[in-house]
């Protein structure tokens, strides 16, 4: 039996939102398994610096996942510079926090444009390439615990992540005949810059201190700590590898036990 992820060596992976947080941890894990990574991010400077830190052959491209033209141009750049693409991690995401009855159209659109439309656009670009070239590629989308259980103060975010899971399942069914697998991961309370912002927002909305909010997150987690980006990265490596060759259309929980459904 081959070690986990050994089959990934020599492949090329595009990671959206790869400059920081979960995306960066995934990119680092893939590099450790011999994958050439392309860091796609709306912040090209940050993507370039992350690529420089991760590996000599890592690349960076600018990509605004909400815009088809930007996704197309970024993907074309990947193909031109890397000579192909075998794996996609659609990780770019945003959040905001507000009671459901106070949400504006702009709040809704901001979350859906990045979290749902962004996954749609980059998945479509990758699958078109895979089908055209006969590549039996693999995709992993970043969903959320909030895509399994509706989260108070995050109704719009939850809805966008539920959409990611629905899209993942449907695309997986269509792509199966091409040997292309599409899965998603559902993280819980992850220690990232995004979480740091959310904790401040939630504390303000619930008349709590940020530390009280964090303590509540830990109390809700059976494994007893906040999740780290690296906790998700290992699962993504598994889902992209041949070890998961008979898995597709799954939204895999990695929450420390917060949700077990």
Image: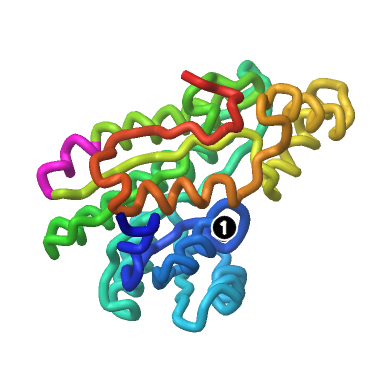
The residue positioned 52% from the left and 51% from the top of the image is 233
- Direction from residue 41 to residue 237 in the image, left or right: left
The magenta-colored residue range is: 171-178
Q: Position of residue 143 (x, y in %)?
A: 47, 37
As drawn, 121 above or below 84: above
The secondary structure making up most of the magenta span is helix
Residue 42 appears anywhere in the view: no
| Of the pair 90 and 259, the residue shown nearer to us | 259
Residue at 73 percent of width and 28 percent of height: 217
Where, by quadrant of the figure, is residue 9 drawn?
Answer: bottom left
Residue 85, quarter of picture: bottom left
Is 42 in front, or is 12? 12
Residue 211 seen in render: yes
Q: Position of residue 129 (x, y in %)?
A: 20, 61
Q: Secondary structure at mark 1?
A: helix
Q: Quadrant of residue 168?
A: top left
Q: Position of residue 82 (x, y in %)?
A: 33, 77
Residue at 17% x, 61% y is: 135
Where does the N terminus fall, quadrant-wise? bottom left
Q: For label 1, count other residues whose C-alpha is less than 10 Å away and answer few (under 14), some (14-19) or many (20+).
A: many
**Left or right of 40 in this view: 217:** right
Question: Which residue reaches farthest top?
Answer: 101
Q: Which residue is mark 1?
A: 25
**Residue 52 percent across, percent down from the top left:** 57, 79
| 64 lies above or below 194 | below
Magenta highlight on residue 177: yes
Residue at the outermost front position: 1
Residue at 45%, 71% in the rendered image: 61
């Amino acid at each position: 039996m081959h070690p986990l992820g050994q089959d990934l060596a020599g492949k090329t992976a595009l990671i959206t939102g790869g400059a920081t947080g979960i995306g960066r941890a995934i990119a680092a894990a893939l590099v450790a398994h011999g994958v050439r990574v392309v860091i796609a991010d709306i912040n090209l400077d940050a993507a370039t610096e992350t690529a420089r830190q991760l590996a000599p052959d890592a690349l960076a491209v600018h990509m605004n996942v909400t815009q088809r033209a930007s996704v197309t141009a970024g993907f074309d750049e990947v193909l031109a510079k890397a000579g192909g693409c075998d794996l996609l991690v659609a990780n770019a995401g945003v959040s905001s926090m507000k009671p459901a009855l106070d949400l504006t159209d702009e709040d809704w659109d901001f979350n859906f444009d990045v979290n749902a439309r962004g996954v749609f656009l980059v998945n479509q670009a990758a699958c078109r390439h895979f089908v055209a070239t006969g590549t039996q590629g693999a995709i992993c989308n970043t969903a959320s615990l909030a895509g399994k259980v509706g989260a108070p103060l995050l109704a719009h975010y939850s809805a966008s992540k539920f959409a990611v899971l629905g899209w993942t399942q449907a695309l997986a069914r269509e792509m199966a005949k091409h040997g292309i697998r599409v899965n998603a991961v559902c993280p819980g309370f992850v220690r990232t810059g995004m979480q740091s912002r959310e904790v401040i927002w939630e504390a303000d909305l619930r008349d709590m201190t940020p530390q009280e909010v964090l303590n509540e997150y830990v109390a809700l987690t059976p494994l007893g700590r906040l999740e780290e980006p690296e906790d998700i990265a290992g699962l993504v490596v598994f889902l992209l590898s041949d070890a998961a060759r008979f898995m597709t259309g799954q939204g895999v929980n990695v929450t420390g036990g917060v949700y077990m459904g």
